[in-house]
Image: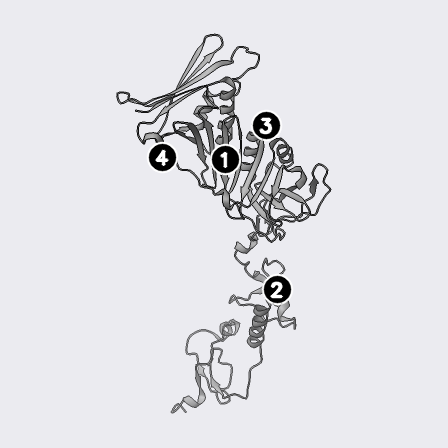
Amino acid sequence: MVVLNFTLTPQAASKLHDLLVCLGKFSDTVAVEARREKFTFTALNSSKSAYAAVTLDGKLFFTKYECIPSSGGPDGRFTCSMYTKALLSVFKGRLYDPLGRDGAIDRCEVSVQERENETQCRFIVKMVCNQGVIKTYKLTYEAVDVMHALFDRSVAKNYWSMSSGVIKEYIEYFGTKTEMLDIFAGEDGRCVFKSYTEKISNGKEILKHPLVTAVAVSTSDFEQFTVQAGTHIVISVKDFKAIVVHADTLKTSLKAYYSQPTRPLQFSYGCDGLLCEFTLMTSGDYTGAPLTSTPAPQTLGSRGASRAPLTVTDRTSIRSDMPPPTEPASRRDRSGRLRNPGSRQSSSAAQEDPESLFIPDAQDARRREDDEESAWAPLDYEKEETLGWDASADHDASVFPTFRDSGSMSTTNMSDSNEVFEPTQRVSQIKGLW
């Protein structure tokens, strides 16, 4: 049987509400891990691309903290999982009121009920109000194994730190429908935060209109900035906004650690016994090539920084995943083959389709040109005479020996057909027929 009891001040209970709001933007459930000296909330999003861990120090954050796990010895722990909305219904936003008006609490007492003779385990929260009223909440939890994301800061050579309040001013420029955030360290002493959404096209229809907003920040505005020039690191705008807004509630600095694109990035901040660490999946590159699917944005200058040309990440074009367009029906005959370009147009002009999304390379163009010329080249009459199948039966057998069609198909119908059968034998191979 585990023993877990702790007490929160009104200020600490209000901070607990803020961190639960932040974790709720990552996952619908939050995992709890209680050890002898610390208490941790963790959350993992559904795509497993973002992991959040908020650690509360048992001596600094709580007025009273006691945790004795049922097993594991000194390193033992108690773990469980609960719905985030259930906890938010208990830890509401206005638990702390500096004026001590009605509705404010005096303290918050939390305990875990885990007994063998009880049918259900409970997470019990008691709100002791100033007027002597006690509100008791009993929440059901589920025992789970909590996993942690590992991040090695010793290999994270790129590092920057900035006031969360300043970053919050910058993210207000980001569009509400943008999805990705590109953090680019330029060689001109500026860092560009660019939020964008990619354009998705289906033929001539645009499913998503590209929206790009870029904010150029001078590196002197950072508290610390050590990043390799030309590095693009791409993360989710939604995750970044949630982290910045929560960091601003603590009035602390936001720190970022990362090594290279496609490797995890970690944001870290905290104060007064509360430590927040968010590990995010990233993409990006070092080349600084412009995006193929987004237009060049208009750069917003930072405080004391002039406008600068924006360089964006090199990402795979969406159109390369589409199948090649079919040939227009007007360019095909009844048999489905391309018509003969008898107007003496060049083969390259015949091959290039202005509606096509693909441009052939030089080797493919030359190869297709040779095939096109050989397909429409005149017959070589100097070669050995061949014996073919003439379904129309219009030729004189004394001049061109052929096999005549013995079927009932009329000559008129046969002459309307465009199908031609290739020769099957040479005349020299036919013996004894004449």
Tell me which numbered mark, 1 or 3, is placed earlier along the sequence: 3
Closer mark to the observer between disc 1 and disc 4: 1
| Mark 2 vs 1, N-terminal side | 1
Query: What residue sits right under mark 2 in the picture?
Result: 352
Q: Please name the amino acid that badge 3 sits on.
A: Lys
Residue 434 vs residue 322, the one in the foreground: 322
Q: Which mark is residue 234?
A: none
Between the residue at mark 2 and the residue at mark 1, the CA separation in whole angstroms equals 53 Å
Q: Position of residue 328 (x, y in %)?
A: 57, 60
Type of amino acid at the residue the image marks with label 4: Asp
Q: Which residue is mark 4?
A: 145
From mark 1 to mark 3, how far is it between C-alphas?
16 Å
Label 1 Cα crowd, 10 Å radius (few <14 / some 14-19 / many 20+)? some
Where residue 98 appears, as percent x and y from the top left, is 57, 14
Is residue 8 visible to the viewer in this orientation of the structure? yes
Distance, label 2 to label 3, CA atoms, is: 60 Å
**What separation in Å lies between label 1 and label 4 (alpha carbons)?**
19 Å
Which element is circle 4 on? loop
- Determine contact: label 2, label 1, CB under 8 Å: no
Q: Amino acid at mark 2?
A: Glu
Answer with the quarter of the image where residue 298 lies: top right
Circle 3 residue: 251
CA neighbours of label 4 inside 10 A, class few (<14), some (14 to 19), many (20+)? few
In front: mark 4 or mark 3? 3
Say what secondary structure mark 1 lies in: strand
Mark 1 or mark 4: name the one nearer the start of the chain: 4
Q: Earlier in the sequence, mark 4 or mark 2?
A: 4
